[in-house]
Amino acid sequence: MLFEFFKKLEKSRWLPWVGTSPFFLVPIVIMFGGEVARGVGILAFFASMWGGIIMGDKLALIVSTHLLKTSQDIGKRLRAAFCAFGFVFLPVLVGSFTNANLGTEIELHSTGAHLLWACIAAGVFFCVSPDHSENGG
């Protein structure tokens, strides 16, 4: 019975909205509390995670098709690596900007440390990205 419940839950359309709602509600609550700049900064910080994925994907697509002209498999691996890099590193840049200009007080390590971990994450995603074959295997 529990297994069937999780199968139905996986196919639910409202589950992603419930899961991501705290990322939108917390900055809105902060904005209603009178700290609009801080709320906008935190919202920008959370949005930069998705922005990093989108920008990484588009940049990798341009690099793999126009600059390097790689095979389709290497292109998929590059896209996964660039998405991981963007997801890890772009929020650091946005967080540093919002800390300096909007007073968000997001605690961050050094930019160099985040750059190192973004490169490591990109390398891992490049090496272990799954094969997307037609037969599902």
Image (spheres, rainbow, N blue to C red):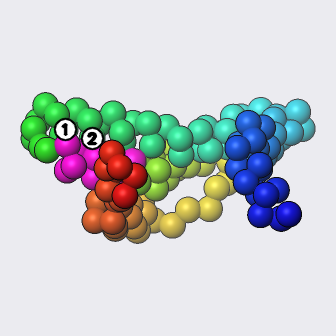
In magenta, the rendered stretch is: 72-83
Disc on res. 60: 2
The residue positioned 67% from the left and 39% from the top of the image is 43
Disc on res. 63: 1
Quadrant of the snapshot with the N terminus: bottom right
**113 or 100, nearer to the observer:** 113
Q: Percent x, y for residue 56?
A: 36, 42
Whole-number angstrom distance, CA of label 2 to CA of label 1: 5 Å
Q: Describe residue 114's horizontal placement relative to residue 10 as left or right.
A: left
The residue positioned 37% from the left and 58% from the top of the image is 137
Q: Eyeballing the image, is 41 above or below 77?
A: above
**127 or 102, nearer to the observer:** 127
Quadrant assignment, res 102:
top right
Q: Percent x, y for residue 68?
A: 10, 41
Q: Percent x, y for residue 115?
A: 36, 61
Circle 2 crowding by C-alpha within 10 Å: few under 14, some 14–19, many from 20: many
Quadrant assignment, res 3:
bottom right
The residue positioned 60% from the left and 48% from the top of the image is 99
- Marks 2 and 1 in Cβ contact (< 8 Å): yes
> Magenta span has 81?
yes
The residue positioned 12% from the left and 43% from the top of the image is 70
The kind of residue on which mark 1 rests is Val
Q: Identify the secondary structure beneath mark 1.
A: helix
Q: Describe residue 66's horizontal placement relative to residue 124 as left or right.
A: left
The kind of residue on which mark 2 rests is Ala
**How many marks are shown on the rendered structure?**
2
